[in-house]
Amino acid sequence: MQKGRRAIMAKEVLIVDDQPGIRLLLEEVVKGEGYAVSTAETGKEALDYIEKNDPSLLVVDYNLPVMNGGELLHRLNETGYDKPAILMTGLSVESLGEEKDFHFVKKVVSKPFNIMDIREEISKILQ
């Protein structure tokens, strides 16, 4: 390693949403904060990714095709998953199941969300 340079492993955020516009917007914001970003369109795709990789934070939509966000969080909870997650939903928080209470779910964000609020929440969780 060259003197004065240090190896920095960027924290990675996995964004899971089936809406391309939301994925792209969140990806731009997260990259702008200096974090690595991966994306998935379904809960199943996210679960497969998590089994092979170790993202620092999940940003998961509740309403997803194939395997919804609730099922994904249940599966992760069963395995003892311990990385933080932000759950996004178009439903009222009161109508969500127990997923909102899992220890690794740090924040539930209602859609439509304020992009500056979610940016702050991501930075706060990853610092």
Image (cartoon, grey):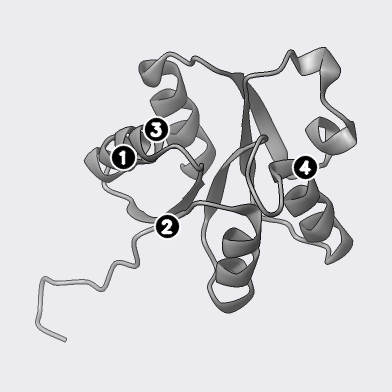
Q: Are marks 3 and 1 in contact (CB under 8 Å)?
A: yes
Circle 3 or circle 2, nearest the eye: 3
Q: Can you give x and y, in whole percent of width and height, for residue 12 in the image?
A: 42, 57
Q: Find residue 100 and report its horizontal and vertical position in percent.
A: 79, 31
Residue type at tag 3: Ile
- Residue at 71% across, 45% down: 68
Q: Which residue is mark 1?
A: 24
93 to the left or right of 112: right
Q: Is residue 84 left or right of residue 24?
A: right
Q: Residue at x 83, y 41 (%)?
A: 102
Query: Which badge, 3 or 4, comes first in the chain's sequence?
Result: 3
Q: Earlier in the sequence, mark 2 or mark 4?
A: 2
Q: Which of marks 2 and 3 precedes in the sequence? A: 2
Which residue is found at the position 58% from the left and 60% from the top? 46
Q: Which residue is mark 2?
A: 12
Which residue type does callout 1 highlight?
Leu
Mark 2: which amino acid? Glu
Instruction: Kindly check if marks 3 and 2 are in contact, taking CB atoms under 8 A apart as contact.
Output: no
Q: Are marks 3 and 4 in contact (CB under 8 Å)?
A: no
